[in-house]
């Protein structure tokens, strides 16, 4: 894996962990009236972050092709 794929995997893991921690707090039923709209927003942001991470993880690394030097004709 190259650097952007590792970064993508870390973003995905962070988004999933953040969403699970927030969901645990909501399931404890503290401040549910405020938490439900916030849950929807956090869920949307987490999904977006997960999607960005997934895109970065599954993107093929860019292969650079060395350019050939033009040589002047001899003679």
Image: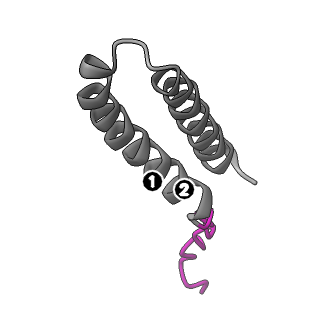
Seen in the picture, residue 26 relative to 71 is either above or below; the reply is above
Asked if the residue under mark 2 is in contact with the one under mark 1, i.e. CB atoms within 8 Å, the reply is yes
- Residue in the image at 61% along x and 32% along y: 17
Q: Which residues are magenta?
A: 60-75
Q: Residue furthest right?
A: 1
- Residue in the image at 61% along x and 83% along y: 74
Query: In the rendered view, does 38 fall on the left or right side of 28?
Result: left
Instruction: Kindly identify which residue carries mark 2.
Output: 54
The residue lying toward the viewer, choosing from 30 and 7, is: 30
Magenta-drawn stretch, dominant element (helix, strand or loop): loop
Which of the 4 image quadrants contains residue 69? bottom right
State the separation of the CA atoms marked 1 and 2: 5 Å
Seen in the picture, residue 31 relative to 7 is either above or below; the reply is above
Seen in the picture, residue 57 relative to 3 is either above or below; the reply is below
Which of the 4 image quadrants contains residue 44? top left
Mark 2 nearby-residue class (10 Å; few <14, some 14–19, many ≥20): some
Q: Residue furthest top?
A: 31
Q: Position of residue 57 (x, y in %)?
A: 61, 56
Mark 1 nearby-residue class (10 Å; few <14, some 14–19, many ≥20): some
Q: SS of the residue at dot 2?
A: helix
Instruction: Kindly identify which residue carries mark 1.
Output: 51
The residue lying toward the viewer, choosing from 21 and 74, is: 21
Q: In the image, is residue 67 part of the stretch drawn in magenta?
A: yes
- Residue in the image at 23% along x and 30% along y: 37
């Amino acid at each position: 894996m190259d650097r952007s794929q590792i970064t993508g995997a870390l973003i995905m893991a962070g988004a999933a962990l953040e969403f699970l921690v927030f969901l645990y707090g909501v399931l404890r039923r503290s401040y549910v009236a405020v938490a439900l709209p916030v849950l929807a927003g956090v869920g949307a942001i987490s999904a977006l972050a997960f999607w960005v991470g997934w895109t970065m993880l599954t993107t093929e690394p860019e292969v650079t092709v060395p350019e050939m030097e033009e040589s002047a004709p001899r003679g």
